[in-house]
Image: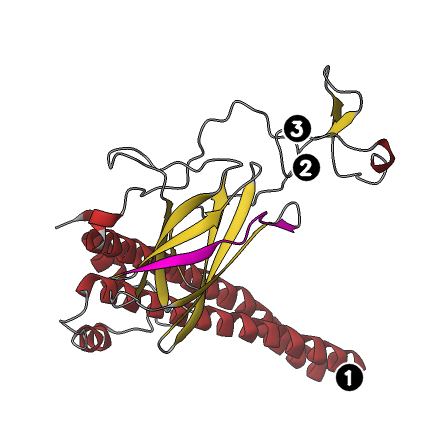
Amino acid sequence: MSTLFRLFLTGLFFSLSTSAVATISTANKAETLSTIDPMMDPMMQMGKILLTDAEQMEMESVGMIQHGNNLRKKIAKLRVKQRKLTDGKEKEALLNIINDYSQEIPKWQDKAGRIRAYGQSLHNNGIAVITDAFHKRWEDHINLVGPMVTEDNKDKLLSHNSPIRSMHPTMLGKMQEMETEKKEAMTISTPGMMGQDIPPGLNIETFQISRDKNVFAHIEPLTIEDENDLPLVPLNKIHKWKLILSDLDGKPLTGAKIEIVGHMPGHVHGLPTQPQVTADLGEGLYEVDGVKFQMRGWWVMTFQVEAGDYQDEVTFNIKL
């Protein structure tokens, strides 16, 4: 039994300690599993089930947090009422009620936290199962299983469109976010690359699920001559990508209409080019041409996909 499959079973049948958390029964799960279409990829469908369960857990946790917030509002109203009471026994009785409500709030918070953590575990397991099945399905077409890797570049990229660019002296005071430095061979200062606050734990994998969880996708550069080479991302060079699209049942998405948008969040600018899908190769495989990155840093590429009943988008974070 593979590690991923054991992980799936663990997430599927793991029971939590409180009755409030155990919202999905084994009987219901068995009934759900019985609906899996044998004509589709069973592992991708099981991963899809895990993602559905993860969403249900998230909704449960949100409901519990809202319940805790409602208790706080109720307590606030009771405290106002208590301050207006003149009878000592009534004040004491109301204070006991307030204390009981106060003791309930951390319990609901704890339950919400454990449900959310369990839901995140289900989500991660589901993505792992889907990714593994997707990779096996298109194994002959996938040469990159990790994040994007950049080609070695001897030039230090200092500006947005070329390795070194002169900058007019009148702009120095206006470009406050840029560091400037003076090169020996140049008469004026040049703009250095602005710093970026790349979020910690940023997901930079080349396998991603779409926003509405209808589409699963993989991207990689078409820059290798030998299938044993690692596809690398060139800088300041227009190149091609491979895009693979599938639904969450493992069915290839063919004939899709795809729009591509790219930008650099830390610099608030887009790509210097407008990449386009130039070939539909069938079986969910597409060729994208016109990709170019003119500087290192954090890039975001979004593929807006329209295929059949699906109108969804897949976003990839790329760290160069």
- Closer to the camera in the image, 100 or 142: 142
| First in sequence: mark 3 vs mark 2 | 3
- CA distance for labels 1 and 2: 62 Å
In front of the other: label 3 or label 1?
A: 3
First to last magenta residue range? 269-281
Q: How is the image coloured?
A: secondary structure
Q: Residue at horizontal 70%, vertical 84%? A: 90
Where does residue 178 sit, x and y in percent of width and height? 74, 35
Where does residue 251 sit, x and y in percent of width and height? 25, 67
Kindly identify which residue carries mark 1. Answer: 85
Residue 194 image label: 2
75 relative position to 298: left or right: right
Callout 2: helix, strand or loop? Answer: loop
Q: Are marks 3 and 1 in contact (CB under 8 Å)?
A: no
Q: Is residue 117 above or below residue 75?
A: above
Q: Are marks 3 and 2 in contact (CB under 8 Å)?
A: no
